[in-house]
Amino acid sequence: MTGRQEQFSGEEAPPAHLQLDLDRLATWLSSRLPGMDRGLSATKFKGGQSNPTYRLSGPAGSYVLRRKPPGKLVASAHQIDREYRILSALASTGLPIPRPFLYCEDEAVIGSEFYIVEHVAGRVFWEADMEGVPPTDRATVYDDMNRVLAALHQLDPQAIGLGDLARTGDYAARNLARWSKIYAQSALEPIADMDWLMEALPRHLPAHEQTSFIHGDYGLYNLILHPTQPRVMAVLDWEMATLGDPLIDLAHHLRAWWDLPDSGLAATSLVGLDLPALGIPSMEDYLARYCERRAMAVPDMRWHLAYAQFRYAAMVQGILKRAADGTASSRVMVHSQDRVVRIAAMARRSLETLAG
């Protein structure tokens, strides 16, 4: 069976409905991006973006174009302008991101809003075990991934102009209520553990909550690594970035350590692997290193892990509901209903020692 690395890596010709009008784009770029006013070509990155992303090539070199999908969309989704605002704010922070260049709100150019950023050449690993990489390099990559996340969570949103990016306060409670509602609307069959979690998680909300700038889906699969060296060159996919609890962001990031192994494309899991032999830290060691970098005590993560697992189960359930309704993309079929059941059971086990 094709693995995640083969399925999601590289570029392909854009399908007919996502092709770009390159002549019109070149005209728009002529006064805005020197050397990109003619002879353009575009390939689409295969990796699973909800916003189609292309490598745009021309006489001046390569850039990346990221657009809203064409057609009628949910109003709160695919906020390309928001992503571009975030990248622009992060450009002066020292975080590794693709440098932003242009944003276009004129849908007449290619059929939807888009932005253009630097093309960062490098490697993207869709599998957490980084097959074929020496253990010493894996260790360095995981440590650098840890470093970047800790640095991201220590940014001052007000200082970088993102203080009004989202509502602040009670993030955990609001996010939990949102995903409980999404799950309830998406359920295809009763799952007792999900019902238990929706009742128990609100009763055991953490007493204290930090507010930081968070990525929302920080993981190895959203990083570009240097072509040959074990270091992070750019963090991608800022669509879900917001102001919220960094420990929820961290618990989601730790998914590779807790997610269920899967023989298909649904998961990239470290469960059951010989981590010392691979050069990959245990989840406990990784968490301790993150806390050391943030000069904080290692917190009790049971609620945050249980919530991350519950939310992930709800996400998968939502995908399966769209598949059942006939409104999902082809990527949906990597998931199964049994996967929701098993993740819900895991989340319940994570919380039960806390819930009593």
Image (spheres, rainbow, N blue to C red):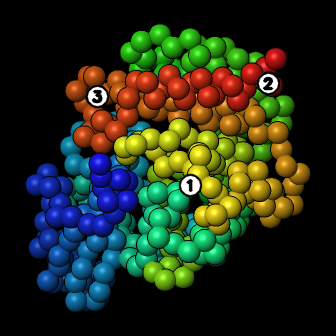
Check disc 3 and report its element: helix, strand or loop: helix
Residue matched to label 1: 218
* Classed neighbour count for the residue bearing mark 1: other residues with Cα under 10 Å, few (<14), some (14–19), many (≥20): many
The amino acid at mark 3 is: Ala
Q: Earlier in the sequence, mark 1 or mark 2?
A: 1
The residue located at (76%, 50%) in the rendering is 284
Could you tell whether 329 is left or right of 190 in the image?
left
Res. 314 visible in picture: no
| Spatial CA span between label 1 and label 2 | 27 Å
Q: Percent x, y for residue 48?
A: 35, 52
The amino acid at mark 2 is: Thr
Q: Is residue 54 above or below residue 327?
A: below
Residue matched to label 3: 323
Q: Percent x, y for residue 295?
A: 87, 60
* Classed neighbour count for the residue bearing mark 3: other residues with Cα under 10 Å, few (<14), some (14–19), many (≥20): some
Hey, which quadrant is residue 95 in on the image? bottom right
Hey, which quadrant is residue 21 in on the image? bottom left
Q: Nearer the viewer, mark 3 or mark 2?
A: 2
81 or 284, which is in the foreground? 284
The residue located at (22%, 68%) in the rendering is 43
